[in-house]
Amino acid sequence: MKIIFLEDIPSVARKYDVKDVRDGYARNFLLPRHLAEAASPAALKTVEGRKARASRESAEDAAHHEKLAERLKTRVFVISMKMTESGTTFGAVGAEKIEDALKKEGISIDKKWIVLDAPIKSAGDYEATIEFPSGLKGILKFKVEAEGI
């Protein structure tokens, strides 16, 4: 059965690919879950328009992500945490805390994009990698310090 994929399916197809798959796979898995649709002549025409729009949007997103990565490279963000006298934090600084610090500065980044080697549990200067969905990687510099300083 010839179908049009509506979502990425790992090791099978990418979004808007047109492929032949077994009838049972299409009827029992792909179509009921709205992961694909039958490749009728009308659907094939509309998928071309969708593909063009998606490629324009991905190019716009990539340009936006590139500007954002340049903006992040030049700044150092501060995350204030409650700490013991020895300088260890109560809790850990993870992607969610970093996302909150960026939101306070007016920068919107999904916490799924933030990659840390390990949770941070002490004061100091750190770097995190930002992996944008467009494939671009950026560096985010931040400082963890005690609250009230």
Image: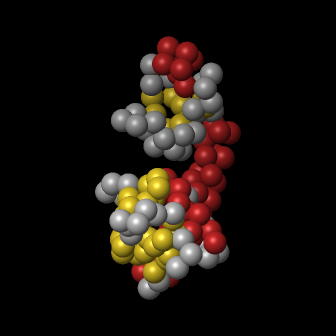
Q: Can residue 119 be seen in the rendering of this structure?
A: yes
Instruction: Give the mark count.
Output: 0
In the rendered image of this protein, does residue 100 appear above or below residue 112?
Answer: below
Percent position of residue 20, x then y:
45, 28
Q: Can residue 68 be seen in the rendering of this structure?
A: no
In the rendered image of this protein, does residue 17 appear above or below residue 70?
Answer: above
Percent position of residue 38, x then y:
60, 29
Left or right: 125 with respect to 5?
left
- Of residues 15 and 79, which is closer to you in this image? 79
Q: How is the image coloured?
A: secondary structure
Q: Looking at the image, which residue sits at the far left?
A: 117
- Of residues 142 and 58, which is closer to you in this image? 142
Q: Residue at left 36%, top 65%?
A: 86
Q: Looking at the image, which residue sits at the far front?
A: 85
Percent position of residue 84, x then y:
43, 62
- Of residues 63 and 145, which is closer to you in this image? 145
Left or right: 70 with respect to 40?
left
- Of residues 27 and 1, which is closer to you in this image? 27
Q: Residue at left 53%, top 44%?
A: 16
Percent position of residue 82, x then y:
51, 63
Q: Which quadrant would residue 147 be assigned to in this image?
A: bottom right
Q: Residue at left 61%, top 76%?
A: 105
Q: Which quadrant would residue 57 be assigned to in this image?
A: bottom right
Q: Residue at left 49%, top 77%?
A: 77
In the rendered image of this protein, does residue 63 appear above or below residue 116?
Answer: below
Q: Which quadrant would residue 64 be assigned to in this image?
A: bottom right
